[in-house]
Image: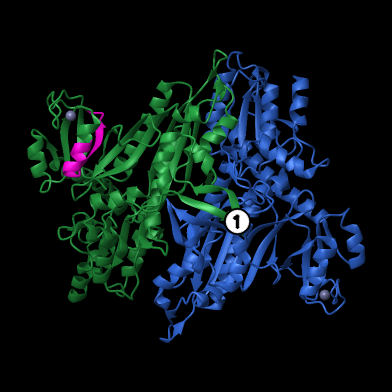
Chain colours: A green, B blue
Amino acid sequence: MAKKEKDFVKEITPMEEDFSRWYTDVIMKNELVDYSPVKGFMVIRPYGYALWEKIQSYADEKFKETGHKNMYFPLLIPESLLTKEKEHVEGFAPEVAWVTHGGSQELGERLCVRPTSETIICHMYKKWLNSYRDLPYLYNQWCSVVRWEKSTRPFLRTSEFLWQEGHTLHETYEESQEETLKMLNIYKEVAEDLMAMPVVVGQKSEKEKFAGAFATYTMEALMHDGQALQAGTSHNLGQHFTKAFEIKYQGRTGKEEFPFHTSWGISTRLIGGLIMVHSDNRGLVLPPKIAPTQVVIIPIAQKKEGVLEKSNEIFDKIKARGIRVELDDDLGNSTGWKFNQYEMKGYPIRIELGPRDIENNQAVVVRRDKLEKEIISLDNIDETLSEMLDTMQSDLFEKAKAHREAHTYVVTDYEQYKKDLPTKPGFAKMMWCGCRECEDKLKEETGATIRCIPFEQEDLGDKCHICGKEAKHMIYVAKAY
Amino acid sequence: MAKKEKDFVKEITPMEEDFSRWYTDVIMKNELVDYSPVKGFMVIRPYGYALWEKIQSYADEKFKETGHKNMYFPLLIPESLLTKEKEHVEGFAPEVAWVTHGGSQELGERLCVRPTSETIICHMYKKWLNSYRDLPYLYNQWCSVVRWEKSTRPFLRTSEFLWQEGHTLHETYEESQEETLKMLNIYKEVAEDLMAMPVVVGQKSEKEKFAGAFATYTMEALMHDGQALQAGTSHNLGQHFTKAFEIKYQGRTGKEEFPFHTSWGISTRLIGGLIMVHSDNRGLVLPPKIAPTQVVIIPIAQKKEGVLEKSNEIFDKIKARGIRVELDDDLGNSTGWKFNQYEMKGYPIRIELGPRDIENNQAVVVRRDKLEKEIISLDNIDETLSEMLDTMQSDLFEKAKAHREAHTYVVTDYEQYKKDLPTKPGFAKMMWCGCRECEDKLKEETGATIRCIPFEQEDLGDKCHICGKEAKHMIYVAKAY
Ligand SMILES: [Zn+2]
Ligand SMILES: [Zn+2]
């Protein structure tokens, strides 16, 4: 058995050795996704999809609580619609898939597979909206989108991905801005509360904003390797699209008005972040709130009298408390193999229950993030586990936050930053004058980009660290996925 | 107000006058869908999508209870995969949309937008399946599919629709057959329990079966106008696909084996059936279990002291019981307008609550299917409503069943049937020899088709009603959507 266990863990490349291979190993060994016959398109397998279902149901509930309803718009968008908003088409046209034939007939106009749905939704909103009484429009869509990518990585960048896209219309700029930030805040809850993944929230630079947006807001997470991940964005689209699509309504004064417009999205990319924030060299580490299974019971010497009965009794008790629990009584695998298996799969807590434990009215429990054996009483085991899961959830968040803080650097000298970056990956906080030239120079010289202008500004001096001119913003800078 | 009400109801064409326009009116006035800029593609609007969400969550729960897990496979399928199973490609190739360009590049191989996913799923199953220990494979996918249709109708036949497709693999034919029928039975529960829509279940003829199936099973519902609707199908695919895709595994004896394969699907088409089974000339009638809102409270003379307070109190009480309830206290619309509005939208129960009602500790309630005023006590109103909703659910089912029975005819003479059909649309039960010639003749001479060979066979004679030769099956025949 010892040998088998060793081999087993060896299958995952240590992250210190090759972070990218570690990531792929964790994903592939856990069968979260697989490569499909179409380059860049992935299959999301059951264990990966179960994570997405947790994100979906958590977010969907929050969307509905804040008055949003779901709809479904067509997959295919006529080329003439895509091209109506100038910046938008420039941003997306290079990466769309084109349908040219329906059945055996060539189409009169090419249709693109939606890369995002602003254009077709605006086309419909124009048709529907009449009066200020109809506003706000608070709608969302869950679907897949296609963006032809040259180089792809599971979850992080794929030519097709699953997401939701909210599309709202408002009477005033203030309301649209409030909506934009409200949804960013819901995304922050998805990341921090559900996924235990701390994020920095702020605004994107002009260069990095969404094609056609007035302003883009983002949440940025820091991965194990010190690279940033853009984990969700919320756009105030202003009146760019509503004017291009002539969405008009009769305002309160009887005058025709253009509404203010937002869109916002999170995607299966979040799952990539989840992995790169919590997992380790033994495989996945899943925060309890998002874990499809939270507790697994492994009977020890289960053929001995009473072991299976007690295991089942405890299973029922834990399940009755609403904990997602499994009992693995498969005799075809050794307990050692099972320990490895569930560690790799990131089950938050494993319970070992053998004859001696039962005699002593106790169980051995192991938290996936600590991998230390603890002994707990079988009395109120459901309550104890419930508390352990809560503690583990907040411990994971704190651990990830501590990692981020340990990898967040205050830049005092740009030249020094350039030298340090290769050995000190992470977030760099610096001052910026706000000009595109400095932003381009930063990217060119370091490979790092402005992740956001955080809402929580700090005063790190009055000069731009790049050009020395007057500084306008404190920014977060990092290399990013 | 009287005039306005009249005008309002007039907007829906009576079904006796023009059934097809009635159907479209009910859908469009209720904003369930809208036409999109791409011919044949529909937008599903919030009220329509809410119905789909109810179907989804009901079915998904049953799928999971029976051990199925969800996955997601790519939207695009290489042409070479689509063509691997001969009957399948012949069935689907004429109606697929082709992607020929990704970004600015022409693709080496055309990709079709999935019309259904057997081929890409089999390609992946081949890669994954090793041993009999891995079986059964019990997986499902929720997604949209595209089938280029020449003439379309909202929900019933559109070039894109939302559905789920289950795809399972089994060790033995018996298990695959058990699965096929189990899933058909779950569909029957969706139709009959959730939607109060009675269905006839049985097997499709060779001609009508799914392209590539060994056997197709179906549930067929009868619409108001006497036409049938195929509401869900479950296919035993045998080893057709598993052999074409070389899905092999090591069997119990160590020998290589091909698994047995099923697939099964229900779609947004069900919503079309829901409408054509229950709704009337005033608009939608929704069975309580599927109704997004089950009860609406309309305060009468709500400016009078105590009316709004009491309405809110009752709202809270009903809501606490888990009933989906709304309170419409909008002063911008008259109560008459509200009555019409919620009747059109098919809300199962409306409560009218005015000052005199409150004085008498009572409320006026109107069930959408009966449109008669009843007086109920405010004591235990939540319990009373809960019972009323249950009764309404079963009444709607019984009513639809009675309608079906009144429109089910036993054929004694084929020539007479041909004469009667135009004035007596509905299900015809007759005997059939099983040959394709009779099936084609029936279609050609009457426009009706064999809907199914029902599991519940009846003995209606020993001769085929069409050719007079020896009969093999009792069949249900009807014109169908
Ligand atoms: Zn500068
Ligand atoms: Zn015959």
Q: How many marks?
A: 1
Please tell me in which quarter of the rendered image ligand 2 is found.
bottom right
Q: Residue at x 23, y 61 (%)?
A: A21
**Residue A145 or B346: which is nearer the viewer?**
A145
Q: Residue at x 53, y 48 (%)?
A: A111
Q: Is residue B222 visible?
A: yes
Chain of the residue under label 1:
B
- Queried on whether the Cβ of the residue with tag 1 lies below 8 angstroms from ligand 2, the answer reads no
Left or right of B365? Residue B137 is: left
Q: Which image quarter: residue B235?
A: bottom right
Rendered location of residue A147, percent (x, y): 41, 49
* Residue interval drawn in magenta: A440-456
Q: Is residue A448 magenta?
A: yes
Q: Is B361 drawn above or below residue A352 in the view shown? A: above
Which residue is denoted by mark 1 in the rendering? B147
Q: Which amino acid type is marked by label 1?
A: Arg
Q: Is residue B464 magenta?
A: no
Rendered location of residue A213, percent (x, y): 39, 32
Q: Is B332 drawn above or below residue B265 in the view shown? A: above
Q: Residues within 10 Å of mark 1 (few under 14, many from 20)?
A: many
Q: Is residue A317 visible?
A: no
**Residue B308 or B119: which is nearer the viewer?**
B119
**Residue B110 or A270: which is nearer the viewer?**
B110
**Residue B78 or A105: which is nearer the viewer?**
A105
Left or right of B345? Residue A357 is: left
